[in-house]
Image: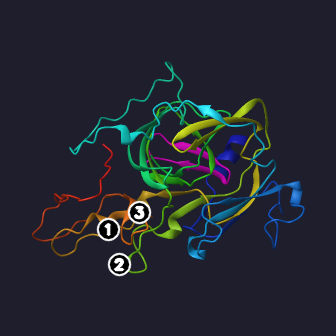
Amino acid sequence: MTNICLSVFLLQYMSGFGNEFSSEDPRCPGSLPEGQNNPQVCPYGLYAEQLSGSAFTCPRPANKRSWLYRIIPSVKHKPFTPEPCGNLTENWNEVEPDPNQLRWLPFTIPKSTEKKVDFVAGLHTICGAGDAKSRNGIGIHIYTCNTSMVDRCFNNSDGDFLIVPQQGKILITTEFGKMMVEPNEICVIQQGMRFSVDVFGETRGYILEVYGAHFELPDLGPIGANGLANPRDFLCPVAWYEDRQVATGYTVINKYQGKLFACQQDFSPFNVVAWHGNYTPYKYNLKTFMVINCVAFDHADPSIFTVLTAKSTRPGVAIADFVIFPPRWGVADHTFRPPYYHRKSQYAFFSPP
């Protein structure tokens, strides 16, 4: 019966993109303070903690923050120490440039009988641009894993992770709640959010990391008010907590300026009983993307298939765009159905094999 109840709970989400959400674990009714963020005494003796995704003084449309009400403050841990980075790197500036078209075979997933590899240990960097220190650029990674993270969580201080499962579903536990993400879905874990990944066998996928910006929905322009990825189809987890002591030590792995660091604490970091705000993790099912297509002649530019964009300071130029080419009707005269050949003067495309 316990497993059935848990499975039903995991399907609970709140819908919307960039909304003001609020949630509390039903096991602690009234845990979310009313009328203020930081009362002198929080309900149930919880600790109030603000997670900021932007500067305090950002304009209201760009201001990102959430308040978390947790059993133990997240700052209560032992000092961070360097952690081996494995195949995760930010040293692409040390690699000789190659202007040729490049492709690669899918990364091999290690067999669990030979070596147990979890999400963090299975990260492989493919390429990137810019760097985390300057707060501008991207990193592109592959993850291959065969075992769940046990008493370990990951926290990216450099940027946002857009995770694209390719083989195997993943159960992501965050400070905000749980999300089940399957192939043909994506999820975004924003900068500074702690999360752990459970897998159900051999698992592989892609990660797009952006520094210094958050993903947004693209402007629709003449398309109008509706189309592409609609805000209502984005799902945010509901509050879920565990009040669990870990005598053997819980490891928090932090990615900071391209390097990994680890610290130890004696409790689970997923002890947030209630929260509210507009800075959250979220998931999206790609089948809900409303495709725009040709209906007369010639070929539309691939930008009409943009799901999410991370804007740069230069208007009309993105740090990164996440674009899909879903099944669709392509009705047009006097043109060729496959994408046309084209060259870009300053941008690069990442096309998974």
- Residue ID at (87%, 60%): 43
Q: Position of residue 126 (x, y in %)?
A: 38, 40
Residue stretch rendered in magenta on the structure = 165-183
Q: Secondary structure at mark 1?
A: helix
Name above or below for residue 155 compared with residue 229.
Answer: above
What type of secondary structure mainly makes up the magenta span?
strand
**What kind of residue is marked 2?**
Ile
Q: Does residue 184 appear in this view?
A: no
The residue that mark 2 highlights is 223
Q: Position of residue 323 (x, y in %)?
A: 36, 59
* Distance CA(mark 2)–CA(mark 3): 14 Å
The residue that mark 3 highlights is 307
* Distance CA(mark 1)–CA(mark 3): 9 Å
Name above or below for residue 68 compared with residue 178.
Answer: below
The residue that mark 1 highlights is 304
- Residue ID at (60%, 71%): 58
Q: Position of residue 25 (x, y in %)?
A: 76, 56
